[in-house]
Amino acid sequence: MDHAAPQSPAGLSTTPSWLLNQTASHATRLLSEGFAAHDLRGYHYRLLATLAEQGPASQADLGRRCGIDRSDVVAAVNDLAGRGLVVRAPDPADRRRNVISATGAGADEARRMGVTLDRVQDDLLTPLSTTEREQLTHLLTRLLHHHSRP
Amino acid sequence: MDHAAPQSPAGLSTTPSWLLNQTASHATRLLSEGFAAHDLRGYHYRLLATLAEQGPASQADLGRRCGIDRSDVVAAVNDLAGRGLVVRAPDPADRRRNVISATGAGADEARRMGVTLDRVQDDLLTPLSTTEREQLTHLLTRLLHHHSRP
DNA sequence: TTCAAAACGTTGGCACGGCCAACGTTGGTT
DNA sequence: AACCAACGTTGGCCGTGCCAACGTTTTGAA
């Protein structure tokens, strides 16, 4: 009686926002599957990578740089500190702040997760040529830039 | 001391998966802000639009067509039925199934939300030319198609 | 025809990213 | 000194996307 089409919400399937969300969803899935091998999540990687690349920072700064809410930074830093990937120390110059630094193990893990990240990018973009990948990156960058102005 | 850069997770900012997630995030935000005016969410629109365009269907079929889990369809249909946008009736031909149909009010609401959807698309794609919008749509469609083959 | 497998609706739960309000503490301004 | 801003922290909420399990009903194969 009903052969049940794959999955394509009617007219939605040509809608940019729909396409965007679906592809992003796939990307997130692939990425979190990859990160699961490290027993960590996206938040952890963002923080770890930022610390490894830009050096120690306060939690508030970290949150700003990573686009993560202060309250979520707390939990993620707790996780990372609990595994010795990161060290939380009071800032002697400003007692409101904690200075977060990546440990050696943390930097290593950041590197390893970076490899995973790269692998996932390739996975994700498999069907696209180099030129097309650049096109996509360019278009998305422009959209993103436009929608991030105050 | 610290001037706090905008928000750009180090090397991540050039990563397609990152760009994808960020732009999708903006799109979702815009969309849910738009849908909030209708006091409904994305799930509701997907179901309503599918019903309005393709006619009545069982919950399982609806879920398949919309890419929504069966269990989530239950709740969303409850909401829609509670507002008279949709009717849930037992299928006489198969007593396992409920036949879901959009009411007149449901079809109206679907239309109205469709307008909101279109407005949000324009909002989202403001900085892109027509050609570029087509490029983006094309690229995303290809990615999506590639990653949805059983 | 009988019996096992599959599909259905439903409940309840979890993960993840994102966001907000509130509090006590500490720092800077005026 | 008084006020306001920033900080870390707790605790909560939302939306999307899953999964497991149950009882009911249908289908298909022995």
Image (spheres, coloured by chain):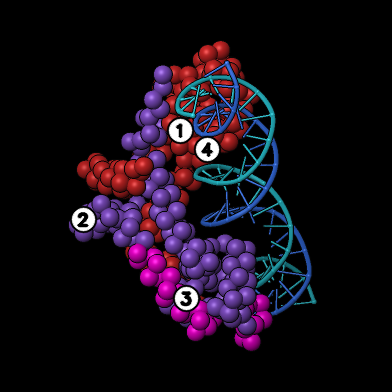
Chain colours: A purple, B red, C blue, D cyan
Residue drawn at the location 35% of the way across and 66% of the way down: A118
Residue at horizontal 60 percent and vertical 63 percent from the top: A72
Which image quadrant for residue A9? top left
Badge 4: few (under 14), some or many (20 or more) residues near its Cα, within 10 Å? few
Q: Chain of mark 3?
A: A
Chain ID of residue with mark 1: B
Residue under circle 1? B64
What is the C-alpha distance between the residues marked 1 and 2? 31 Å
Q: Which residue corresponds to the image point at 50% horizontal and 63% vertical from the top-left?
A: A36
Q: Badge 2 is on which residue?
A: A129
Q: Which residues are magenta?
A: A90-119
Callout in the foreground (1, 2): 1
**Amino acid type shown at disc 1:** Arg
**Residue occupied by mark 3:** A109
The extreme bottom residue here reads A92
Find out whether residue A4 is within the magenta segment: no
Residue B36 appears at what percent x and percent y? 55, 36
Specify whether residue A107 is painted magenta: yes
For the question of whether residue A149 can be seen, the reply is: no
Give the amino acid at mark 3: Glu
* The residue positioned farthest toward the top in the image shown: B92
10 Å crowding of disc 3: few (<14), some (14-19), many (20+): many
